[in-house]
Amino acid sequence: MNSVPTNTANDIPHSARLGLAPPLGARFDGVSTTVAVTVGYDVEHVDVAVFDAVDGSQSSLTRLSHRLGSIVWGVVRDLRPGSLYGLRIHGPGYDPERLIADPYGLAFSGDVDWLSFPGALSQHATARSGAAPADTSSMMPKTVVVDTSFDWGTDARPSISWEQTIILETHTKSATKLHPGIPEHLRGTYAGIAHPLFIEHLTNLGITSVELLPVHQHTDEERLPGLGLVNHWGYNTLGFFAPDHRYSASGSTGGQVNEFKGMVKLLHEAGIEVILDVVYNHTCEAGPDGASLAFRGLDRHGWYRSEDVTGCGNTVDQREPAALRLILDSLRYWVSEMRVDGFRFDLAPAISRGDFGFSPESAFLSAVGADPILREVKLIAEPWDIGIGGYQVGGFPAPWAEWNDRYRDAVRDLWRGEPQPYGNFAARISGSSDIFGGSRRLPWASINFVTAHDGMTMRDLCTYEQKRNEANGEGNRDGTDNNRSWNCGVEGPTDDEAVSELRLRQQRNLMATLLISQGTPMLLNGDEVGHTQRGNNNAYCQDSDISWVNWIGADQSLFDFTARLISLRKSNPSLRLGRWLTDGEDAAWLSPSGTPMTIAEWNDPATAGLMLWLKPPEGQPVLIAFNDDLEQRPFVLPPCDLGWSLLLSTDVRADENRTQGETYEYGAVVNLIPRSLSIFCPTGK
């Protein structure tokens, strides 16, 4: 390594001549590249190391010679689009031999080589031949200078209203890695998501919005390479402005940026929104003894809180100006430059804490609420972290929506036969007004889900009662033991036809309940075709067929059933009201006898069977009958001038007969088989 700067960045950008520091990061203006970084008060100098794209050697070193407060900058003549660079930091407690990644980098090439990295886990040290070199540049990803120009053409946001929104949570790679119709070199990439066959799958299903698991450039945790594993989910961010090159068919020298933009453009053309799962609560630098890769490498004091409320070793302190600025700059960049339509914030309370715990008026929430760019996109909170007071379901201000785990638990409990008063279940499928109504929000604020990336798939909820995480290398100790699952009488795969039929019915029950509930439904990609993770409920490190959606074994009947449910939801406003239901006017809750539920029936966990009659003026009436019992149960249909027609049923045989014009008069008795749900509409509607 050439440790002595050969260049000094004496050029002063126009903004600096006006007394302003330039934008952070490396920005090419068509003529030259300005590099600006935020550093700690004890940093003395910052050098920009430029690397040869062919052999990886350092080709030049330029000292940034201008400083205004905490921002250091200069024009680096050797940097052009496609150039690779890193930062070397000088000052007490900083080691210029350790290459530091630019937190504002727009693209990265390469990954952290933990098996060679100085200070890596001792179990890796024996794999090294001789002493590790002091210079870490060969072990670090390099930041790539990017030309951000892109032809968006007539691109326009779909701007789906919350009431119309149906979210599919998916992983960029897992979604298409095994898709036989997509060219092999595009599978598992942004271009794979944008392929006509996958977009056709989304549109045929009826999805309005895809929520991508983290696509920001991430690193693996230090221990995973020694186990032959990787961080597949990506909740370990290095670059908050950079689309991860692992999901790019265009290489890792900047092409991933335009490939991502191309994906967004094509999804928008199909009327589909793009929502990003973002992880601003912690970074990839682990705990206080972790490696300094980017943030801590620029400022040893200013990034993290003293307490960790994420369980990942560090918690970003949004009270620090540099940290808050990075979060806001990143969000604005993805909206303005990459044109995404919203964000789901991982462990959102962690970045919404003041000096004394979570606060709806925290610096982060206040800044987002006041931002003219960010307040125009969808904002979704995962409303919990692991700290004291970290469970905040219902605690976020308008216009935030929130993942509703109480909905998930109530629906799973109903269909697995866990005794519970119906009142909790009824509140959940009505939009959870007891959680969100008090903050003057509307039902769409509840993001309803039964499954998500974290946990079992829908098929596995009906197949396993015990997790199967041995492949994760932690002796099956990782992942929750509270799955709220039911194996239908046999643990794991079976050839028993009766059990297999019940499992399919259970998947239909869960899917149907999700899509007839008030609020915003979120499906897990793969559930619509019966994907299994073979019981693994913590597949974060499984970049394998455990995680990859199995298209060859896709259950077409389950897909068709789900698509019909979504079509029904879209066509009938009764199932997606933008206001709270009024009992007695918009909705009636009935027992299987066809009479209103009594207080005793609401409170008795032994009560079996429930009907919801939706009849708001905005939509067509619909009657939903739930038989969560293990026995067949008769249901008496309530008064209806025209009688009732069966729309669909989770009983496969009854559902197949729906085309035969089966209708029922007022007072007719319909026998619902065990563990089934049926939906009726007035005859002729």
Image (spheres, rainbow, N blue to C red):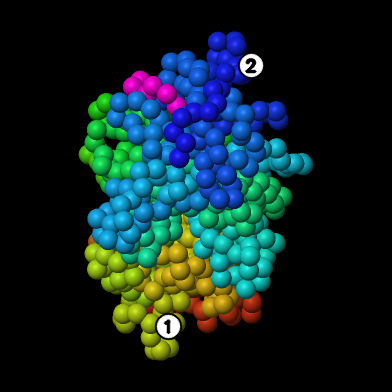
* Camera-side residue of 108 and 625: 108
Tell me if residue 445 can be seen. no
198 or 460, nearer to the observer: 198
Q: Position of residue 383 (x, y in %)?
A: 36, 43
* CB under 8 Å between discs 1 and 2: no
Q: Amino acid at mark 1?
A: Ser
In the rendered image, residue 541 lying in the magenta stretch gets the answer no
Q: Of residues 416 and 322, which is closer to you in this image?
A: 322
Circle number at residue 500: 1
Residue 300, picture quadrant: top left
Tell me the SS state at disc 2. Answer: helix
Q: Of the numbered discs in the image, which one, if any, rests on residue 14?
A: 2
**Local SS, label 1:** helix
Q: CA distance from mark 1 to mark 2?
A: 69 Å
Q: How many marks?
A: 2
Give residue 218's position: percent from left, percent from top.
45, 48
- Looking at the image, tell me whether mark 1 or mark 2 is earlier in sequence order: 2
Q: Is residue 558 above or below residue 233?
A: below
Taking the magenta stretch, the answer to whether it contains residue 44 is yes
Find residue 39 and report its image quarter: top left
Q: Is residue 311 left or right of residue 12?
A: left
The answer to which image quadrant residue 84 occupies is top right
Q: Residues within 10 Å of mark 1 (few under 14, many from 20)?
A: some
Q: Position of residue 9 (x, y in %)?
A: 56, 22
**Magenta span dominant secondary structure:** loop
Q: Which residues are magenta?
A: 41-46
Residue at the spot 50% in from the left edge and 58% down from the top edge: 171
Using the image, tell me which numbered label, if any, was put on residue 522.
Answer: none
Q: Which amino acid lies under the numbered mark 2 shown in the image of this protein? A: His
Q: State the quadrant of the C terminus.
A: bottom right
Figure quadrant of the N terminus: top left
